[in-house]
Image (spheres, coloured by chain):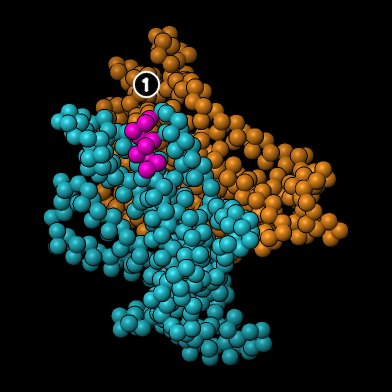
Chain colours: A orange, B cyan
Amino acid sequence: MAKDEARPSKPISGGSIGEANLPSTAAVALDGQARASASPFVEGVRRLRRSATAVVGAVIVGLLLVVAIFADVLAPQSPIASDQQHTFERPSWDYPLGTDQLGRDMLSRLIHGTRISLLVGVSSVLLALFVGVPFGMIAGFYGGRVDTAIMRVMDLILAFPIYLLAIILMVIFTPTAGLIGTMKVTGAIAIVRIPIYARLVRGSVLSIKEKEYVEACRALGVRDGWILFRHVLPNCLAPIIVTTTLGIATSIIVEATLSFLGLGTQPPTPSWGWDLKANVAFIQANAWLALFPGLAIFVTVLGFNLFGDGLRDALDPRLK
Amino acid sequence: MRIYILRRALGIIPTVLMITFVVFVMMRSVPGDPVVSLLGDAYTEEDAQRAREEYGLNKPIVLQYFIWLGKLVRGDWGASILTGRPVLQDVLIRLPVTLELIVLSMGVALVIALPAAIIGALRQNTWADYTATTAAMIGVSIPEFFIGVLLLLLFSIGMGGFLPSSGWVYLPGTCPSMICGAGLWGNAQHVLMPAIALGVGRAAILTRLLRASMLEVIRTEYVTTARAKGLSEGPVVFKHALKNALIPTVTVMGLQIGFLIGGAIVVETLFAMPGLGTFGIDAIIARDYQQVQGFALITALAFVVMNLLVDLTYTFLDPRIRYA
């Protein structure tokens, strides 16, 4: 595992605490001897660039990010302005992907929909990380009653079929349009995904806290918080990064599914899941309308899955 | 073993109680209540108050839960506030539809995944392997409803309505009331697309996992031994390798149950099937407390029972795993 690889380049043997605290990249720059064996980060990036899947995934994700950031410039028309003169236009030069039942340009809706998908996908995972990781670290590090209390709550969430919980949460939050609506979806998905990170981190911490370098820190009287964030956390990053990337793919699917069920971000805010659902009704005569939002979801999820797979192979060869 | 099963079966009870209780509390924190939708637009506050009293909605939430539980123990699942129909009856009408969908989709998943994973692992890094892994990668990235839409385009619209795009015909013998249509061919026509839509994603996950664990198992010494003692490839693959490779796969399949229930909701919605999924989502959106409780109960039961079955499968796959 990457944890094992990370260890040799961490100057833990015979060094001072100050030395042990150096981030691995800085250690490479300062310590001439360490340069021969590259830092795990550099090594990881090198292996990542050799993996075709990771490169393809990274390109897809990168392009989608560009589309999301420059949606206002890239979209030829407004994604929400309806035009009764041009409903159900077939794909043409004016409307490359046609128009829907309200005469809205499909391409523009898809381009703006990228924002919602990526925003919800990435921020829900980050939110789940920021709650789940500290809880997992505390549970694993301190054990005992704290561990039991935290993990009971996590198991409670895990005991639910995730869609049942996400759907009820969305009904409680009442779906709305715009940024607030997007934040509600983000929150609902994040709550459902917190235990995944808490469990993952707790598992890693349980093994890391028994290591000599943690013991050394304790012997030197280093504060717990410092040990956790400077010594324990960096050593359980590899599985976290991999799970995060693949988690974004899952979150995007969950968002699209909630939208498809009518419980995601509400119209007029463009959302792929909603667009697909709304256009299934017209599938008989206008198949492309349901096809394009579905393709958009598929390509986005594929991008994150490919990138995540590549990352896993690069950082965690044993998990392959 | 028998004691273990008994203990696990008893362990189901607290989990089910917990899930139903949390759902109970959560549903009552949803803004709005079913009385308002029951009475329509024109009602006085007194009417609403009287209705709430009638359904016991004015009592403390915990008390309401215990009343629900008390009735449940006596076999009374309550009645829908909006339609007045007994919840248990509705659940029983809809259960066979969802059960058939889930069982068939798992069948679809196995039929695709077993050969794909075995061939992929035995012929690693050949075109057959690349095809299997690429297809699996695509499979895990397509949401169920998009596969459903593609199937609709292909079989329903493309082939002039060869397969119906919505509705349901019951499997003979599963229809609990006299009014529903039943027939083998009609049932097959209706269930084919939903089962494939739900099964393909599972097939992809299974393929990826099983291929990876097959690759690991096939390099172990006991497989080499089996080959060395002259066994033909068939028994080596199926009796020695596959059985051991299935263990991690079965674990993950257990974890997939939560997604399968969500997938059933989505697929049933897309194909307008009268199953538990559509029952549940409609009930949640209409805030029909009693129906939601019924849905939560049957979901929780299915969830824990399936997890128990997964654990028991281990002993079959690996006799060294024994539950005392």
Q: Amino acid at mark 1?
A: Lys
Residue position marked by numbered label 1 in the rendering: A10
Q: Percent position (x, y) of residue B316?
A: 20, 52
B219 falls in the magenta region: no
Residue at x 49% of width, y 88% of height: B53
Which region is colored magenta? B115-124
The relative height of residue A25 versus residue B283 in the rendered view (above or below) is above
Question: At numbered mark 1, what does the secondary structure look like: helix, strand or loop?
Answer: loop
Q: Percent position (x, y) of residue A196?
A: 41, 47
B120 falls in the magenta region: yes
The relative height of residue A290 versus residue A300 in the rendered view (above or below) is below
| Magenta span: chief secondary structure | helix
Query: Could you say which quadrant of the image residue B3 lies in?
Result: bottom left
Q: Percent position (x, y) of residue A200?
A: 37, 42
Label 1 resides on the chain identified as: A
Left or right: B109 with respect to A105? Answer: left
- Which part of the image, by quadrant, shows the N terminus of chain A? top left
- Does residue B262 appear anywhere in the picture? no
Residue at x 47% of width, y 49% of height: B201
Q: Percent position (x, y) of residue B30?
A: 53, 70
